[in-house]
Amino acid sequence: MMKELILKNLGQIKKAQINFGDLTLFLGPQATGKTLVLQIIKLLLDSASIVSFSHKYGYDWEGDTGKFLDFYLGDGMRSVWNKTTEISFDNSPPVDLEKLLKNKSQKKEEQLFFMPAQRVLTLANGWPKLFTDFEVGDPYVVRHFSNHIHQLIQKTGSGNQGGLIFPQKSRLKQELRDALDRSIFHGAQVELNTTGMRKRIQINIEGNTLSFMTWSAGQREFMPLLLGLHWLIPASKASKKQHIKWVVIEEPEMGLHPQAILSVILMCLELLHRGYRLIISTHSPVLLEAVWAIRSLKEQGCSPDYFYQLFSLKKSTPITELFESIIPMNFLSYYFEPQNDGVEVRNISSLDPFDEDSAISNWGGLTSFSSQVSEVVSRAVQESL
């Protein structure tokens, strides 16, 4: 289990020392290297799985690490890992990429499940694409995620749920299903239907079926995330995928109303409760507010009653067990801070709104505009009196 990652001169990243919690947040502006670091974590944990899976589908970089980086990270990305790059984890020597890709001792079972920011692109008119349906230069994590949910959907309809995708009683707690329904689906059902001899994911609203492109933008963004959650939460007595230890979710808030973001946060807590370790990249102040509140309640030794108030939920035994399991967990936050000579990754885990360090008090810039608005309006009011 990876505990610490040290990076130097990786793409735009000048330096980073990241210790992982049960939940680890990555914050920062666009193009500061968050996705790059997440892809590298996946590579370090799953290199044997990545090599085996890629060879299975006929992709071969012929020992050229530059070709591999273009294949894995995406076209034009080979230069991000160069002669000055140093990557190490858990006090190990710096990683040699060529040796990493040839390491036959590493387990071929996937350890980290990656839900990329571009996940909506995996659904073509309501149907997930296969790994080979993408361009060769598309990032591996996007193609791999799409392949997973394609396999999941192929199995839908074979069990006692029929073609019903949401809500499924066998996958999610009633309280979580209700939260997702109130904030995203509003009484509609998500079904797998066959139209014109082709399977498609559709929404059923009081007997009227809507094709994928007629859904709301938030529903379209959320659908592949929901399918990823379904893949992680088996429709059986097993609490999790046995071999998966880590889950990466990029921007889970994408396209969603704040109330829907709270529902997604509950789903993330459910993943933690089931034994997964999470790494989340986000631009959402709502998610940071929730994490700061949970962290504060934990530090004060508060009972789960306050967690119910935080998420506006009614009490139930399953949700109490979920909240109680979260209390001892470790939540860490890292800010990818742009500087003149590159990006430096800083630990801002306290999220203290009264800290003198603006990176901490403004949560990596997520609340800086709110603070600025308050100051400007207050000053204007004072001057007008």
Image: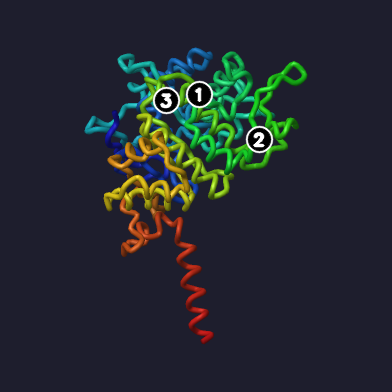
Specify the quadrant of the image occupied by residue 146: top right
Task: Relative to 377, say whether 49 is above or below.
Answer: above
Residue toward you, 40 or 9: 40
From the image, tell me which residue sits under label 2. Answer: 188
Per the image, label 2 sits on a secondary structure element best described as loop
Mark 1 / mark 2, whichever is N-terminal: 1
Residue toward you, 296 or 345: 296
Q: CA distance from mark 3 to mark 2?
A: 48 Å
Task: Relative to 110, say whether 300 is above or below.
Answer: below
Mark 1 / mark 3, whichever is N-terminal: 3
Q: Residue furthest bottom?
A: 385
Residue toward you, 32 or 175: 175
Circle 3: residue type: Thr
Residue ID at (63%, 20%): 163
Circle 1: residue type: Ser
Q: Which mark is residue 170?
A: 1
Residue ID at (55%, 22%): 147
In the rendering, at what x and y percent does residue 154 appear? 60, 17
* Marks 1, 3: nearer the viewer: 1
Q: Which mark is residue 212?
A: none
In the rendering, at what x and y percent does residue 49 appear? 41, 19
Kindly tell me whether residue 343 is visible in this rendering.
Answer: no
Per the image, label 1 sits on a secondary structure element best described as loop
How would you rate the neighbour count of disc 1 (Cα within 10 Å): few for under 14, some for 14-19, many for 20 or more?
A: some
From the image, tell me which residue sits under label 3. Answer: 65
Residue ID at (27%, 34%): 3
Circle 2: residue type: Ala
Quarter placement of the N terminus? top left
